[in-house]
Amino acid sequence: MGKMVVSTSKLTLVAFGAALLLFAGCKALKVEKANMVSEGDWLTEGDSGERRHATGEVLDPPLEEVWAYNAGAGFGPGSPLLLGEAVIVGTRKGEVHAINFETGKRMGIEGFGDVVEGTPVIQNGIIFIPVGWGRQALYAYDLGRGETRWKLKGVPIETGLLALDEAFIAVDAEAWVRKYNADDGAVVWEQPLGERVTIHTTPVLARNNIVVADDRGRVVALDPSEGTAQWGQDLGSPVYTSIAADEASLYVPTTRGRFFALDATQGRVLWKVELPDTTVRFSAPAVDGSLVVVGASDGSLRAFDKATGDQQWIFHNDAALTATPLLTPNTVYAGSMRRSVFAIDRATGEKKWEQQLRGRVKSAFAARDGYLVVLAEPRYVFLFKSASAADVVSP
Amino acid sequence: MVLLRRVSSLLTFLCVGLLVAPVYAQYGFHFGRNKIQYENFDWHVLKTEHFDIYFYTEMQELAEHGAAFAEEIYQELENKFNFSLNNRTPIIFYSSNLHFKQTNITPGFIPDGVGGFFEFLKGRVVIPANGNLHRFRRVVRHEMVHVFTFNKILRVLRDHRIPPDRFLPLWFTEGLAEYWSGEQDYQHEMVMRDAIYSNYLVPLENIYRINGSFVMYKEGEALCRFIAETYGEEKLLELIDKAWMDRDFRKVLARTLREDFLVISDRWQTWLKEQYYPKLEDAEFPTAIAGGLSVEGFNSKPVFYQFEDGRRQVYFVGNHDGYGNVFYVEVDSLYRPLTKPKVLVRGERGDRFEAFHLFESRLSVSLDGKLAFVTKSGEKDVIHTYDLEAGQLGPTYSFDDLIAVYSPSWSPDGRQIAFSSIDQSGFIDLYIYDTEARALRKLTNDSYDERDPAWSPDGRYLAFSSDRTSVGQENAYNLFTYDLETGGVEYVTFGKHHDLSPRWSPDGNHLVFTSSRRDSTGRYGGQDIYVIDMATRPSVPTPVVAGDGDGDSDTAPAALVEEPYIEEPAERGLRQLTRLTTAAFDPVWTRDGHMVFASFENFRFTIRQLPEVDSLMSAPKKREVVNLADAGNQHWKFERLGTDSGVERLPYRRRYSLDIAQGQLSNNAIWGTTGGAMLAFSDLMGNDRLFVTLYNTSQNSGDFLRSLNVAVSRVQLHRRANIGYGLYRFGGFRYDITDPDASTEFPRFWEEIWGGFGSVSYPISMFRRIEVSTSLSWDDKQIPVRQIDRQALLLSNAVSLTHDNALYGQNGPVVGWRGRLTAAYTTDVLYSNVNYVTLAADIRHYLRIHRDVTFASRVTARVNDGREARLWFMGGSWDLRGFPLFDVRGKKMWFTSHELRFPILRAPSLYIPVLAPFGIANLRGALFFDAAHAWNESYNEKIPQIFAGETLGATGIGLRMNLFGGFVLRYDIGYRFRDGFSRHDKRFKQFFFGFDF
């Protein structure tokens, strides 16, 4: 009897060990065909280096919830990424999750420091992950192989990254802008932006310049090859959310009720919006066609004419709109601090659809093939499907 | 309160097993004052967009203002926090501080100065009004910043999957609440200036040492303003956003502001000095220009009287030893003190003078020597009189519909008293009471804040301070007169100032008052003494001020509205007599040309006299002309959000929600595996509480049901008499040292009890209550080794009377006395197996010899007599020292203890900074003497196992160390004695914890 007990214990141990290995295997962050990029993939925050937060695919309401995924922690303000069959999100617990787009099941998970606040960027199957707190500051992780290529210690990076050819740009918490070689993480150049300033904006590519803005309200354009300053503009209002760009202009939200359009070539102020209430904070904007759309802490979503700054319409709800809106051909999507996702008519600003979620929506969206990915409190990733979307998602 | 403690004791009893039950029963934290629910409020709720506003019918207008204030700040904070609340916040309003003190939402006592609180368990905000809508608005804003901060930090921590067990430092949360609730007020400026000038500003790195103090609030506000102005307003929110990064907020601060923590601290101090040092150039310290009449403790609201025999005395309210009193000090013709301050009326120890409003209500002396002063007495304030010539208390005046009363002022003929008062509506108005006709007359009826009436020597006018000025919406106060012949209200001063506390000069030609004014930077300067000319007569029209324009001024004469201008001077001469570094309060101009006032300096409120008033009048610091024509005749009022605005109004319905869920599981050699859970529910007002306890002590599965302990109880606190009742079933092995049948060495036996209890606690006053309780239970006790299997249907009735007016220091009571008498009878109504009487008396007296030295005495006698009478017990650090904990036992006992308690180190961490993280608040000593005697049947029958039958004693010295202000470690060394102190038994050392008796 005693021997029997021992052998049962051994068997239990072996089974437990095997289960551990099995689960460990499941946890690895791995995406099939990671280096194959499809048309609708979102490989960087806002789907482009210009952070336009727009899609050309029709995504009209009503939307229907397809799945909800528990990511275990909250999310930063950036958008999720889409790569092939995977939705990729970083969390404030320092994990990056890959979720099956079709089923909402976990494909893989990996921990990177204490927090992933800024949106990673994917380049040639490698995901570059900024770490907002922890011993390491940057990871290059091979999604195809499920292994770390390289990692760098340094000052934490709390914003998203900007991909360039075989390189990428990161801004650390001490306001140093650095260009890294994608292959080995070598620093190509670095540029300090000043003492006691902090950068909360993900760098933007505008007219072949890298543009960042700081919490003193200074917007700086750097040459991507050398890192030298091309121009600077002092807006006098701190910038705490990401800026957006198009072919000619930059759209800069601030925290003091002011929203600016700058000439991307020289940084001249083209137009500005000044609200009477100087405590209003603007969200990061979305840009497409002739419109720039921006949410605000006063509960308003405002659409401006890109060229003139004339307000086209305003949508108001009863809670702050801090998440970056998403522009689609007919509809603007906005997430609110009162647990709602709104679909708003792009032409008129009228509400077309609203869905209550489990928590506040503070992060940007991603969209593909008639599907909308939403990040919401307390720790959920939602996939919504429009009536026009195909049932089977084929990357 | 009392019942709460009783239920808590019951729950603790169940959670830790039956072992400690006798400890609580005997040591019973059954003293304490009473929080009395005088009013049975008829609660209603206004459902605004984001809030549920709870109010009672009489104060609906005020609640509608509060609702508007809350919605107003919500919009602002949504932007500042970039965040929205996802749950409706309940806000409970009271119309006065006296009603607020009755709330059951917090179990603690609420002192005068508390403006409101946010309770985060159920997210409730509780705020009283005090007649001042500006202050009410500010408190609403302050508490709403707390609500947003709490929800925001909780979200930040949850986003990062960090347990919500780390808190932002109090200086930051309170500082932010002050900073974001409005601009810095004159009190803020007064304290910060004083802290800088008197050199008690606590640097950022040491701010934890003043945690929770008034100075910490003001320093916190200044720190938040410094951060906003130096690093950017957005950094304040960023500090919350990054609080997850480290438990140590200093590191969060350094990382967010991108600067070394000590550099931040230095820069803040420099920033403050740069603002305040230049103002020192031509300012005077109160101590340098005015002689002190009472400089110890807190002193305020002076008045003066010269007796018929020529003696001069200055009267004031003060707190020198923990209790508020009316003091007096005799002065010579030059107003130099001839004596130390003496107590005229001893307050705050009994029902009659329950509490003084130390900084809110002035005194008044009539020409014939009658002193009028206000205290809380029961559910409201009353006006007391004291005949100074006769040296005895006079009549007391109370008013049915008036709750809070402030600043009485005698008419020149000594027949009428003018005062301001808050009624059930929560608004403050002026009243006159005719003491002979016993008639009360309401002079104003509006939402303005009318304060400090002063009767002119000719009897025609009342001067008062009010925010009814046309610039009152900017929180300005000006002086006015109320013409008692015409009912007209006229400006005396005008401007965006704080003109307060007017008093007439003896000849009626001037008003002396205090005023604080803004400088060119917008900051308030010192609060100085001013004199305005009242002698000049009409030249051009002066604006008249009436009600608030609601048309509901039912007592203000109609002529006010019909005739907007009367003949009064449009200009008045104004003289500034002082230019103080800090503040003067409540100046009084005496008949012989001196000025007595209260001052603030070095964080002390003192009574001072200003010499050479004549020369100050002829050569003042500054002369001005007040142009009253600028005042206009505009009314203002705050917004309201009520049913007129479409807000739903509903009656309050009691709904219960969970307060606490607590579970416990343990395993030990004696009890085996035991476990249980306790749930507590209450309604939103905290008036009705339900407790459910489940506990099991079974040692095997077959024993499960037999060892199941269940108790369900309900406590209702909304009436004056607190009522509790419940049902219980206790079963299992228990360890009970009070059971007379159990083994002396190891009193463990099996017992099963089914029953119910009822209890009523009726507070006679704040200091005294009577308690009655009854229980009926079926009791089956089995002690196999003694072949006892006793069954009984026990009926137990008890009545007790408790008195407690003791004041607590950090380690225990320091002054006052408390006592409790109990009589009880327990009988087995079925078999007469149990039948005994209980009598107990416990008296404790605390004599404060010096500020920090107390002589404490305690005398206790207890008797249980009859069949199966239970044992009392003693021993251990809490009573009879030198003997093992609870080892001295008997059915009857007496005990006495005397201690001299003295300080050793007040704040050791100030001298030895390394001790600071250990939270050592103080180190005190005690010389003690204890004596006791326990016995059963015969006084001298010795039972050595339980030390019965002999007089025992101990004497020695002890050390007491308070940790974190709430936990006291005790270490005693001494000699113990036996056999009536004839035998010097042995030396002992004893370490324990707990407050002094």
Image (tube, coloured by chain):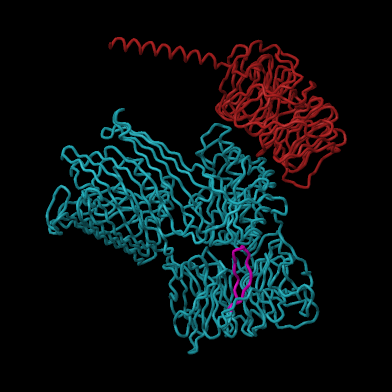
Chain colours: A red, B cyan
Q: Residue furthest right?
A: A308
Q: x, y percentage for residue B186?
A: 63, 62
Judging depth in this view, the residue of A346 and A188 nearest the camera is: A346
Left or right of A169, for residue B608: left
- Residue B578 in view, yes or no: no
B668, B6: nearer the viewer = B6
Which region shows up in magenta?
B417-433
- Position of residue B651 measured from the top left corner of the image (x, y, whole percent): 60, 52
In the displayed structure, does residue B871 sit left or right of residue A206? Answer: left
Q: Is residue A91 magenta?
A: no
Name the magenta segment's main secondary structure. Answer: strand
Image location (x, y in percent) of residue B807: 40, 61
Which quadrant of the view contains residue B591? bottom right
Residue B421: in magenta span: yes
- Percent position of residue A12, x then y: 39, 13
In the rendered view, does B865 fall on the left or right side of A128?
left
> Which quadrant of the structure image shows residue B895?
bottom left
Pick the quarter of the image with the N terminus of chain B: bottom left
